[in-house]
Image (cartoon, rainbow, N blue to C red):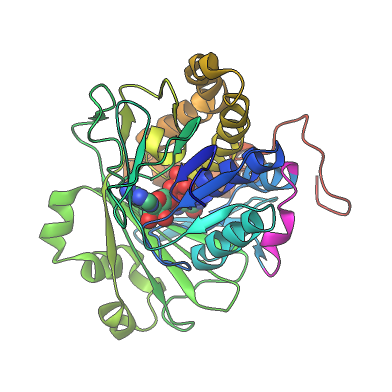
Amino acid sequence: MTDPEVVVIGSGPAGACAAITAAQAGARVMIVERAALPRPKVCGCCLSDAGVAGLEAIGARDVLHEAVPIDAVRLATGTREASLPRTGGVALSREALDARLAAHARSYGVFVLERTSARVHADGTVTLASDPAAPLRPACTVVADGLGGASLVDIPGFQWRIEPRSRMGFGAMLPAGAVDCVRGEIRMHVAHAGYVGAVRLEDGSIDVAAAVRPEALRAAGGPAACARAWLGHAVLDPGALDAARWRGTPALTRRRACLAAPRILVTGDAAGYVEPFTGEGMGWAIATGAAAGRLAAAMRSAPDAWRAWPSQHRALVRVQRLRCRAIALTLRSPLLVTGAIACARAAPRALGAAAHAVGRRPSHAPRPAGAAA
Ligand SMILES: Cc1cc2nc3c(=O)[nH]c(=O)nc-3n(C[C@H](O)[C@H](O)[C@H](O)COP(=O)(O)OP(=O)(O)OC[C@H]3O[C@@H](n4cnc5c(N)ncnc54)[C@H](O)[C@@H]3O)c2cc1C
């Protein structure tokens, strides 16, 4: 494709959903993805109920086939732990989710160019690393290149504002017997310098993802040692953690100075992120990606429509991000987590209701037939 009307940079949940809705609105769409799909991604792999509703809304529910329904969160610190009920979300590996979303986009005629990195320029043109001499001139570029993306570095005004004491992420996939982790339950262990989560995926393997202060990770001796220490008695095969391929992320809590400009919309993690404690990032990426794709298609005939994006974006994620941040800050103290665990044991309904509220689908989104309320 040499003349796309909409170019999407990045094929994570935000980019794929943007491409799908732009194509549904009739645009000629091209996704440019730096990696070859399926590709690994540091992530807790738990899609919230709101995220599931977001996929249903754009006709992409089928990408979740084989996903594991989540019905509980086991919160632990030291040797204390308690299980809280949580319904509506699912666990699915990012390899499966992202590759299936890209395939779903292709079914709408989207052209997906893999193993190619893209860069946006101030005049709205896009160059591909594979052919820098032939810039693309779309009506809109949707930037969905995640936390580590650098496609906007050439344009002044889009710089990151990174929270000074932000934690970083790390994670790995482990074999089935590595950690005591029941199918359908998220294991979440909180320590002084961060937290680590584990969940069983569709093929039985275990996804481990953590947020940690960088200096604590160094002091622990690296990701495997840190995860072993924090997961404690739940580790069944320490050697599997040592042998795993651990990946890291840049600082997590950050926001973009600017989310839109003529012919440019920024979405998903590329627009900003907060610590992943409540596991809602993919839901936010799906909601903002789908909205950005619709606006990008509209910009073919209304080039000034980009002006609406910052307020649309804020309306979609601001409240949820504030809540996630508040929960993450509260649970920075293992003492408060111990209190929450005691409360969960004494009054399971009260804390269960709070756990249910996280990542719940919007009240206007219909629930699929047969699903729990
Ligand atoms: C430790 C941790 C745990 C988490 N746990 C959860 C969880 O349980 N549930 C949840 O919902 N969320 C979770 N998240 C958050 C979630 O992973 C992200 O919010 C989500 O992946 C954002 O999607 P995205 O599409 O914006 O970006 P990404 O998924 O990061 O996709 C960006 C894509 O852009 C590509 N790219 C980058 N630069 C370029 C370029 N120049 N040109 C072309 N392509 C490029 C990358 O290769 C990548 O494929 C977690 C995050 C962390 C760090």
Question: Percent position (x, y) of residue 321?
Answer: 47, 30
Q: Percent from the top left, x then y, of residue 240?
A: 33, 83
| Number of numbered labels in the structure image | 0
Image coordinates of residue 3 in percent, x first then y, are 51, 43
Q: Which of 117 and 174 is in front in this view?
A: 117
| Residue depicted at 83% across the width and 49% down the height | 368
Quick check: 264 left or right of 356? left
Q: Is residue 82 visible?
A: no
Q: Examine the structure image and report whether residue 62 is included in the region drawn in magenta.
A: yes
Residue shown at the point (66%, 43%) measured from the top left: 23
Return the residue nearer the eye: 180 or 98.
Answer: 98
Kindly tell me whether residue 333 is visible in this rendering: yes
Q: In this view, does 343 lie above or below 108?
A: above
Q: Residue 80 falls in which quadrant of the image?
A: bottom left
Q: Tell me what residue is drawn at x 36 percent, y 84 percent.
A: 237
From which residue to which does the magenta span run? 57-66
